[in-house]
Image: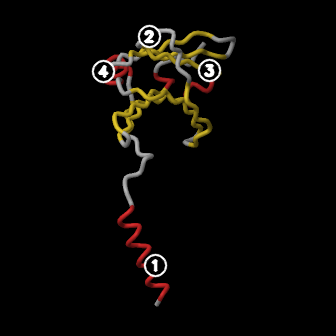
Amino acid sequence: MKTILAIASFAVFLAFTAGPCFAMMSIEFVSKERAKELGLEIRSNAAGPDAVRVELEFKNADALKDFSRVDLELRDAGRLMLSSTLREDKSKPGHIVVSFAVDRTNLDKLTLRIVTQSAPRSMTGHDLRVKDFVELAK
């Protein structure tokens, strides 16, 4: 009887203390057209015989005014292989600039996620598939 009472008490406790998860984020997959609307500029240039340097720049205004960070993800066959937050270059006031270098053969596995957060539980990820913005060929 004590076990049933303990389980019931614990279930009631969980029901009253459960709340929204802090890990929720709405995701928008960004096309080239949508990137222009958001004011995103993606540039690339050679960084050696097989590598490319990719740079993302945008103004910290309008749709992205609640900018929090830019994450880089590497996925292979649907599995997350690497995730990292990119450091911002603050040399241009009012602009966010991030960059990275990668072997061209991995461009199709990369996603840049611009994270905006307007409230503690309101995060949005703007996902840019790098292969859609950078030429895979040399």
Residue to which mark 2 is pinned:
93
Label 3 sits on residue: 104
Tell me if residue 43 comes above or below residue 62 in the rendering.
above
Dot 3 or dot 4: first in sequence order is 4
Instruction: Give the crowd class for mark 4: few <14, some 14-19, many >=20 residues within 10 Å.
Output: few
Q: Earlier in the sequence, mark 1 or mark 2?
A: 1
Task: Please give left or right for residue 18 compared with residue 49 in the image.
Answer: left
Q: Which of marks 3 and 1 is nearer the N terminus?
A: 1
Of pointers 4 and 2, the one earlier in the residue sequence: 4
Q: Residue 61 versus residue 103: which sits nearer the camera? A: 61
Asked if marks 3 and 1 touch (Cβ < 8 Å), the reply is no
CA neighbours of label 1 inside 10 A, class few (<14), some (14 to 19), many (20+): few
The residue identified by callout 1 is 7
SS of the residue under disc 1: helix
Q: What residue type is labelled 2?
A: Pro
Disc 3 to disc 1, C-alpha distance: 55 Å
Of tags 4 and 2, the one toward the viewer is 2
The reply, left or right, for residue 106 in relation to residue 119 is right
Q: Which amino acid does label 3 sit on?
A: Arg
Nearest to viewer (mark 3 / mark 1) = 1
Quadrant where the image shows the C terminus = top right
